[in-house]
Image (cartoon, rainbow, N blue to C red):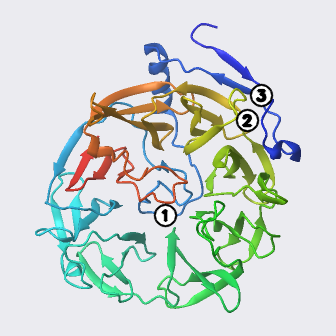
């Protein structure tokens, strides 16, 4: 068949214990090379242009989220970008450290306190790049002036924005409620329980531990944060030894969809040594609906067997996607992905990858409509692989450069950035590309400044990197990209 090449792999020789569990989907890995011909590109663009927008998951948010949705899908609820985007405007207010962009209506909220002028929270017009209003007094309190600082933006049911901003003077973190129309702080909130706050879709949860009771727990707060609605205390205390090679924080970052909190954590009901299991928790009651208990064995130390860690969940196509971990020569890595039924936790499928190399490592992943696009390394090979969310089968596979990185998606198109170096290994520029999620076909390529995409800085788009920070750009509903750099803000479309 012209333009296509089929490769069939078996799964022989892999040492992963989960093969013995009998739950691995019997799916043949069939990697089809994408067709990048002009004709195939035009067919893909025509289909994408005429197809209704796909709904990745049940996310009730109206404002933007750092990773597209509350479901950790990295799929922005936006039109597909079908042609190479061009710079529309760029402003440089003199910031030396900026906050991630947050879109509210026609405004982009961002800012910095690490500068001499234009300090504070700024609201920037999406169309013109002009500053509509600025709140500068937040930099004059809490010893924040001149500090890098890191903020979180959250949507409130009232249509206002919650700005959570830690102080530098040792006092409790501030929770500012912003009226985006007037550009004023209208009130501050005092949480009934302080700790690590997570919140998307109007729901706020706080993570804590109680050493005297011997548990970690999740508290759900009312919309004004003044009351505790429920607490789930089914989790273990933090691991005491952070140097342990199997150490993980008690909780992962969660996903939220359809009124359910999907949270990976170590359960008190596990036998030792525990690992983090995915829990589905009703956001109204705090009741644990189900948890994933069939982690395969990952490693053995003497007579002790360590089991796989479920990692950060992604919700898409009525499924929760988690990882399968393995170990080779003392190094842990993600060897496969597993889909669970969103309502019952029943295992639906587990991906198969190549047996040609004992270490096939899955890195980042994003959802592009009904395709789960993954970034995979197999020895010296670096590839993108598209798995069908219906059954975990492989739709296509393509090679990418070692310095390329899978980033995000919108409307069924996914985006890849690549750092291009000079001969002396200094940055030259970034290549930015768009691909059709269904076929893997390359749609467009453009070169843009390195600092626009922020590649190489804490792997901002790597879903499992514990040191990752919020991505430095976001995609609006019309397909426009708004990003922040060390000094300013830009728009691509």
In-image side of 434 versus 336 (left or right): left
Mark 2 → mark 1, Cα distance in angstroms: 34 Å
Q: Earlier in the sequence, mark 2 or mark 1?
A: 1
What residue is disc 1 on? 61
Q: Is residue 362 above or below residue 482?
A: above
Q: Residue at x 18, y 76 (%)?
A: 136
Q: CA distance from mark 2 to mark 3?
A: 8 Å
* Few, some or many residues within 10 Å of mark 3 (<14, 14–19, 20+): some
| Category of crowding for the residue at label 1, using alpha-carbon neighbours closer than 10 angstroms: few (below 14), some (14–19), many (at least 20) | some
Distance from Cα at disc 3 to Cα at disc 1: 38 Å
What residue do we see at 42% from left, 42% from top?
79
Query: Label for residue 168?
Result: none
Label 3 secondary element: loop
Quadrant placement of the N terminus: top right
Residue 429 in which image quadrant: top left
Residue 352's label in the rendered image is: 2
Disc 2 vs disc 3: Cβ atoms closer than 8 Å? yes
Seen from the viewer's position, the closer of residues 50 and 280 is 280
Q: How many marks?
A: 3
Q: Are marks 2 and 1 in contact (CB under 8 Å)?
A: no
Disc 2 secondary structure class: loop
Label for residue 28? Answer: 3
Mark 1, secondary structure of its residue: loop
């Amino acid at each position: 068949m012209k333009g296509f090449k089929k490769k069939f792999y078996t799964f022989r020789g892999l040492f992963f214990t989960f093969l013995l569990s009998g739950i691995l989907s019997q799916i043949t890995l069939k990697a089809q090379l994408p067709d990048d011909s002009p004709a195939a590109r035009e067919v893909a663009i025509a289909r994408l242009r005429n197809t209704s927008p796909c709904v990745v998951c049940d996310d009730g948010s109206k404002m933007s989220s750092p990773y597209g949705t509350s479901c950790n899908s990295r799929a922005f609820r936006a039109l597909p970008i079908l042609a190479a985007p061009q710079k529309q405007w760029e402003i440089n207010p003199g910031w030396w450290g900026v906050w991630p962009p947050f879109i509210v209506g026609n405004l982009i909220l961002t800012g910095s306190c690490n500068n001499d002028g234009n300090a504070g929270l700024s609201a920037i017009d999406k169309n013109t790049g002009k500053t509509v209003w600025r709140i500068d007094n937040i930099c004059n309190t809490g010893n924040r002036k001149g500090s890098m600082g890191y903020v979180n933006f959250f949507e409130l049911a009232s249509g206002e924005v919650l700005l959570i901003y830690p102080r530098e003077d040792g006092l409790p973190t501030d929770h500012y409620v912003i009226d985006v129309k007037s550009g004023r702080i209208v009130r501050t909130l005092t949480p009934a329980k302080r700790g690590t706050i997570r919140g998307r879709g109007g729901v706020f949860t706080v993570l804590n531990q109680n050493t005297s009771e011997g548990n970690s727990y999740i508290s759900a707060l009312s919309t004004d944060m003044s009351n505790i609605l429920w607490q789930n205390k089914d989790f273990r205390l933090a691991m005491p030894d952070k140097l342990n090679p199997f150490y993980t924080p008690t909780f992962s970052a969660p996903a939220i969809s359809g009124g359910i909190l999907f949270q990976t954590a170590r359960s008190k009901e596990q036998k030792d040594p525990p690992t983090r299991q995915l829990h589905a928790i009703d956001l109204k009651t705090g009741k644990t609906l189900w948890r994933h208990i069939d982690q395969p064995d990952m490693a053995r130390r003497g007579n002790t067997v360590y089991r796989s860690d479920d990692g950060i969940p992604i919700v898409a196509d009525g499924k929760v996607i988690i990882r399968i971990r393995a170990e080779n020569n003392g190094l842990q890595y993600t060897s496969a992905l597993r889909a669970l039924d969103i309502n019952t936790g029943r295992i639906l499928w587990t991906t198969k990858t190549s047996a040609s190399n004992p270490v096939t490592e899955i890195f980042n992943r994003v959802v592009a409509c009904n395709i789960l696009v993954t970034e995979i390394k197999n020895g010296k090979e670096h590839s993108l692989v598209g798995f069908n969310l219906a059954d975990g089968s492989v739709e296509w596979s393509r090679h990418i450069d070692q310095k390329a990185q899978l980033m995000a998606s919108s409307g069924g198109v996914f985006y890849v950035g690549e750092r291009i170096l000079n001969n002396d290994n200094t940055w030259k520029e970034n290549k930015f590309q768009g691909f059709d999620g269904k076929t893997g076909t390359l749609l467009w390529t453009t070169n843009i400044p390195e600092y626009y995409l922020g590649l190489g800085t804490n792997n901002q788009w790597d879903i499992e990197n514990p040191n990752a920070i919020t991505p430095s750009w976001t995609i609006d509903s019309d397909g426009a990209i708004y990003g922040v750099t060390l000094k300013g803000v830009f728009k691509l479309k």
